[in-house]
Image (spheres, helix red, strand yellow):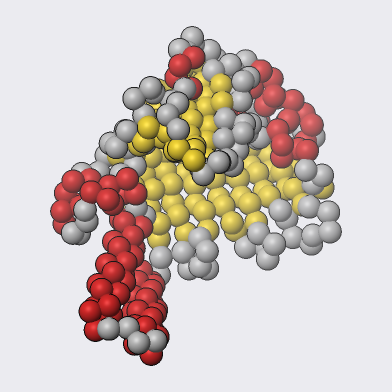
């Protein structure tokens, strides 16, 4: 008996959209580990390059000041001020390095109907111990600590720093309509709207039927994206790979351990590997879901900035209390 024919891309899309229509507000809790991998000594080399460049800049500035007749007292003040800036740069490099290894507890509240979301993160690292061990001061806390809240709307993002009572409003829209789909392992609907040329194949992997979809942007000779799904799990993704213009892997996304919640399949573990700016660097992000709730009543003030926060609106470069 011949195997059943592979489904079409539109049949796969329809299965996912049916499940998405059953989802209103989604609340998901879990833990995230994030590790940015680099080649040996890359961090130290970058830090040394920056330090050398700033040091050379300081010396050039002082030389120019001397040539223009600055007094020794004025030159001493310039050197002190620029050296402080150099030390601040070193602190920023330390914070950036520490934040390449994160452990976060996150609660995500997503309302796709009104296109809004809120993410509340709690940094599981001992931030005070990290600051003491690396000689950081309180000015570095906001950059180091990942205990933050983020409200994502269509036209802006609001980042809340509870440790200092600050909320920063950014102009760039951040809400992504396909976030719910990804979190449920459903192929995001925009994937089918980008004009890709699709190839769908049905294969066997270790006794399991897998439907493999390859999408290629017109004019390209190599795939743009590859997605593997399981028909017995309503075509939920088991692997998604995005390729860059050179055919190299830009992202690999692996949802797994699907379990039903209110009749909707949810991957309890996802692993994401994203390529960095350097060919040798990449980020591995693992999310483990501990609790999922669908279509529950949410206090509308959850998507508002707490009244005790001081608001800095970078869209107008002015500050105002909200």
Depth check, front residue: 2 or 75: 75
Residue 181 in the image, given as x and y percentages of width and height: 60, 30
> With 58 as the anchor, is 237 left or right in this view?
right
- Vertical placement of 299 versus 221: above or below? above
Residue 90 in the image, given as x and y percentages of width and height: 30, 66
Residue 107 in the image, given as x and y percentages of width and height: 40, 28
The N terminus sits in image quarter? top right
Seen from this angle, which residue lies furthest bottom? 67
- Vertical placement of 199 versus 260: above or below? below
Residue 110 in the image, given as x and y percentages of width and height: 52, 24
Seen from this angle, which residue lies furthest top? 297
> With 281 as the anchor, is 147 left or right in this view?
left
* Residue at x 27%, y 47% (from the top left corner): 141
Whether residue 18 is visible to the viewer of this picture, yes or no, is yes
* Residue at x 16%, y 49% (from the top left corner): 129
- Vertical placement of 251 versus 124: above or below? below
Q: Which quadrant of the structure image shows residue 150?
A: top left
Depth check, front residue: 259 or 178: 178
The C terminus sits in image quarter? top left
Depth check, front residue: 117 or 32: 117
* Residue at x 32%, y 33% (from the top left corner): 165
Number of labelled discs? 0
Whether residue 122 is visible to the viewer of this picture, yes or no, is no
> With 120 as the anchor, is 300 left or right in this view?
right
Depth check, front residue: 187 or 83: 83
Q: Which quadrant of the structure image shows residue 167?
A: top left
- Vertical placement of 300 versus 97: above or below? above
* Residue at x 23%, y 45% (from the top left corner): 127
């Amino acid at each position: 008996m011949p195997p059943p024919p592979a489904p079409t891309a539109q049949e796969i899309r329809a299965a996912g959209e049916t499940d998405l229509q059953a989802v209103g507000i989604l609340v998901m809790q879990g833990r995230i580990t994030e590790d940015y991998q680099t080649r040996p000594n890359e961090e130290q080399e970058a830090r040394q390059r920056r330090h050398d460049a700033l040091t050379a800049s300081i010396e050039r500035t002082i030389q120019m000041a001397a040539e223009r007749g600055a007094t020794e007292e004025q030159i001493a003040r310039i050197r002190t001020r620029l050296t402080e800036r150099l030390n601040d740069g070193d602190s920023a490099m330390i914070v950036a390095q520490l934040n390449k290894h994160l452990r976060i507890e996150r609660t995500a509240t997503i309302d796709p109907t009104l296109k809004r979301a809120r993410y509340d993160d709690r940094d599981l690292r001992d931030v005070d111990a990290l600051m003491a061990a690396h000689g950081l001061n309180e000015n570095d806390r906001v950059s180091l600590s990942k205990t933050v809240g983020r409200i994502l709307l269509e036209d802006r993002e609001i980042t809340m720093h509870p440790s200092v009572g600050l909320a920063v409003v950014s102009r760039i829209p951040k809400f992504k309509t396909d976030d719910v789909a990804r979190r449920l392992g459903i192929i995001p609907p925009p994937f089918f709207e980008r004009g890709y040329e699709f190839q769908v194949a049905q294969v066997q992997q270790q006794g399991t039927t897998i439907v493999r979809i390859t999408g290629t942007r017109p004019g390209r000779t190599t795939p743009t994206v590859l997605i593997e799904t399981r028909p017995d799990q309503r075509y939920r993704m088991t692997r998604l790979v995005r390729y860059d213009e050179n055919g190299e892997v830009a992202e690999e996304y692996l949802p797994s351990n699907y379990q039903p919640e209110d009749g909707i399949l949810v991957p309890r573990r996802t692993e994401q590997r994203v390529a960095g700016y350097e060919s040798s660097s990449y980020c591995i992000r693992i999310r483990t879901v501990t609790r999922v709730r669908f279509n529950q009543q949410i206090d509308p003030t959850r998507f508002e900035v707490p009244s005790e926060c001081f608001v800095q609106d970078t869209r107008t470069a002015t500050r105002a209390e909200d």
